[in-house]
Amino acid sequence: MAVAPEYKAYLEELFAPLGSVVFKRMFGGMGIFRHGVMFALIHSSEGLCFKADEFNIPDFEAEGSGPWEYERNGKIMNMGYWRVPERLLDEPDEFRVWAAKAYEAAVRFDQAKPPRQRKLQV
């Protein structure tokens, strides 16, 4: 299922204050990138998800949110993305804070890779 154009347009407005955000179609949804690093995704059945690590996972847990997981070859896969609480879609200032934290988590993840595998493009 594709992402509805109206939903994508709304999210583009929410992400605009971060600057340099690019939406790319992938895996039945969209990846959301900044400076070449994917920090969010839109999945048709899970909605919007942000990259998370030990620094921002407590925020998601406090909201009762969980990780985005999928099954592959009978195994549960977790790529480090957590479902964004629905209320943030109506709170642009707080949304921006959470999105910035997700980007920071994605940068930390990228920086932990060997130099040749890093994606960050500044």
Image (cartoon, grey):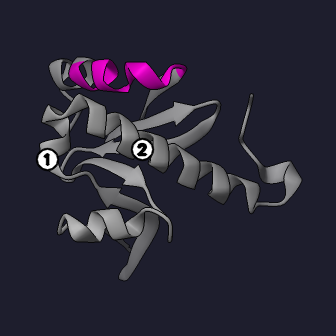
- Amino acid type, mark 2: Ala
Give the amino acid at mark 1.
Glu
- State how many labels appear: 2
Q: Residues within 10 Å of mark 1 (few under 14, many from 20)?
A: few
| Label 2 secondary element | strand
Q: Mark yes or no: residue 67 visible.
A: no
Q: Is residue 85 above or below residue 91?
A: below
Residue 40 vertical placement versus 14 (above, below): below
Image position of 103 with respect to 58: above or below: above
For mark 2, does the 10 Å Cα neighbourhood hold few (<14), some (14 to 19), or many (20 or more) residues?
many
Residue drawn where x is 57% and y is 48% of the image: 104
* Residue name at image x 64 percent, y 59 percent: 109
Give the residue at mark 1: 86
Residue 50 at x, y percent in the picture = 38, 50
Residue 45 in magenta? Answer: no
Q: Which residues are magenta?
A: 10-20
Residue found farthest to the bottom: 74
Horizontally, residue 3 falls left or right of residue 78, namely: left
Which is more toward the observer, 24 or 39?
Answer: 39
Find disc 2 in the rendering and name its residue. Answer: 40
10 lies left or right of 68? left
User: What percent of the width, then of the height, locates residue 35?
Assistant: 64, 30
Which residue sits at x=27%, y=71%? 61
| Residue displayed at 16% across by 18% down | 6
Task: Residue 9: give x, y in percent of width and height.
Answer: 25, 17
Q: How far from the left and from the top, in percent, is residue 16?
A: 39, 19
71 or 80, which is in the foreground? 80
Q: Main secondary structure of the magenta part?
A: helix
Q: Nearer the viewer, residue 83 or 2?
A: 83
Tell me, yes or no, whether the two marked residues, 2 and 1, touch with CB atoms within 8 Å. no
